[in-house]
Image (spheres, rainbow, N blue to C red):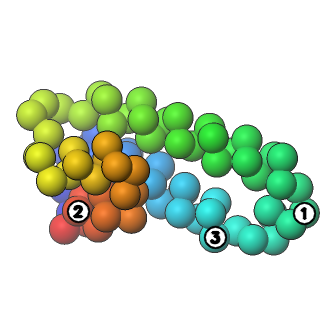
Amino acid sequence: MSSDPAYLTLATALETRLALIADRDWVTRDSASHLAALQEISEKIETLAAELPRPVNGEFAHFLERRSYDKALAWIRG
């Protein structure tokens, strides 16, 4: 796992997004607030990715650009 704090913060946000997606009960209970939370964490991920120290590994950048967030998280955990 990358020990750079910026990557660790991004990993936490990616984990949060994956947990939100998996929370089917919340979707059923209140889809509007679930969608709002998903949009919020997705925007946070975009912001955190833009703030990463440069240069960013090409493969990792590709995962972020394609929003392959599970692959991006796996790369950080490396």
Q: Earlier in the sequence, mark 2 or mark 1?
A: 1
Q: Is residue 8 left or right of residue 28?
A: left
Name the kind of residue labelled 2 in the image. Answer: Trp
Question: Is residue 73 visible to us here?
Answer: no
User: Which percent across, then down, holds residue 8?
Assistant: 32, 50
Is the residue 7 above or below the residue 75 in the image?
above
User: At label 1, which amino acid type do we have?
Assistant: Arg
Q: Cα distance, mark 2 to mark 1? A: 33 Å
Query: In this view, which residue lies farthest toward the front?
Result: 66
> Which is nearer the eye, 73 or 35?
35
How far apart are the two marked residues, 3 and 1, measured between alpha carbons? Answer: 14 Å
Task: Name the secondary structure under disc 2.
Answer: helix
Q: Where is residue 69? Give x, y as percent.
A: 39, 57
Circles 3 and 1: CB atoms closer than 8 Å: no
Dot 1: few (<14), some (14–19), or many (≥20) neighbours within 10 Å?
A: few
Judging from the image, what secondary structure is the residue with disc 3 in? helix
What residue sits right under mark 3 in the picture? 22
Callout 3, which amino acid?
Ala
**Gap between marks 3 and 2, in whole Å?**
20 Å
* Left/right of residue 68 with respect to residue 1 in the rendered view: right
Is the N terminus in the top left, top right, bottom left or bottom right quadrant? bottom left
| Number of numbered discs | 3
Q: Is residue 44 left or right of residue 25?
A: left
Q: Which residue is mark 1?
A: 29
Residue count near mark 3 (Cα–Cα under 10 Å), binned few <14, some 14–19, many ≥20 = few
Q: Residue at x 62, y 38 (%)?
A: 40
**Rendering coords of residue 55 (x, y %):** 9, 34
The answer to which quarter of the image holds residue 39 is: top right
Q: Earlier in the sequence, mark 3 or mark 1?
A: 3
The residue located at (34%, 49%) in the rendering is 66
Residue where numbered disc 2 is placed: 75
